Amino acid sequence: MSTDLFTFGEALSVFITADTESVLTAKDYRRVTAGAEVNVSVAVSRLGLKSQYFTRMGTDQLGSAMIKDIEDEGVDVSLIKRVPQFSAAMVRNPGQSAPVEISYLRKGSAASTIEPADILDSYISGARWVHTTGITCAISQTGAAAVKHVLEKAASLGIKSSFDLNLRRKLWSEDEARKVLSPLAKNVELLIGGEDEYQVVFGSTEAKKVLVQANDLGCKIAVMTKGDQVMRFSIDGQYQELTPPKVVTVDPVGSGDAFTGGTIAGLLSGMQPNQALEQGSICGALVASMFGDWTGIPTGVSGVIDKDIAQSIRGRS
Ligand code: KDG
């Protein structure tokens, strides 16, 4: 089956405190599904493109609930493998009146058993774009090997790919991350990372220097994000900046993934890179302005955000 986007990684059941701002005191929780790659797959689907997501999910009920959430978003979940290990979770407070604190329940999870052989060549060759992140590299060595395999296979098949450095310090040390992520940050159409992530992987936050360095390593569009502040990027050696739309930030978690999904969808729709990055920044701002990883993701047709939604956010800036 052919798809616009193929991506894989770990989906998490996110338990968010509902009665207090702290996991230490909360008794009530609400659950949503999230995870960097699944967030991107949902963004691409909402924007009107075909999106396919692979993971290893537990045979437990949480696994079934998450698959239903993802499928309800129009994402193709038919490749997902069910395995005996548990489905991963994350516990957090909403972060409305106190800083967001997260804890993971994921070591030894179903998705941490993902391995290169899971991703058949046909999954890659059947897609127009393949997206991966550093989180899958952090959850296990087999996960890291799967990311390496997929990026190399996509490059050899001429399929466009993206890699989000997505450093998670709760999962591994900066040294471990640098060793694994540095060799992967090359030969992709789109490389994304925050300032601190470029510092770890490229050894500097000097945007002009590291972004052009990434271009030289074969990353055609290299982007350095900084939350709602000016985004720096370089396309084939040409350094540029973009100011994201201004919104009142309610919950920034997931906005980076919406940015990535919006950018990928824009590029797949045929937009010029600058235009696609602008669309991505609108998607990211919308998600940051609402609570939850998926709530604010806009809808669109054929990869292009609905005009009235884009207008409304441009009007707010
Ligand atoms: O980018 C948002 C993600 O951080 C969130 O959904 C959870 O994937 C996640 C992670 O591993 O932290």
Image: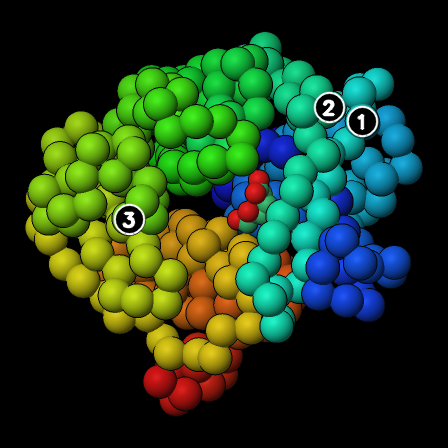
Callout 2: 10 Å neighbours few (<14), some, many (20+)? many
Where is residue 95, by image quadrant? Answer: bottom right
Q: Which residue is labeled 3 in the image? A: 195
Amino acid type of the residue that numbered disc 3 sits on in the rendered structure: Glu
Q: Which residue is labeled 1 in the image? A: 86
Is 64 displayed left or right of 187 in the figure? right
Is 38 displayed left or right of 232 in the figure? right
Above or below for 201 versus 300: above
The image quadrant in which ligand 1 is located: top right
Amino acid type of the residue that numbered disc 2 sits on in the rendered structure: Ala
Callout 1: 10 Å neighbours few (<14), some, many (20+)? many
Which one is nearer the viewer's eye here, 220 or 169? 169
Quadrant in which the N terminus is drawn: top right
Counting residues from the start of the chain, the first of labels 1 and 3 encountered is 1
Which one is nearer the viewer's eye here, 152 or 193? 193
Quadrant in which the C terminus is drawn: bottom left
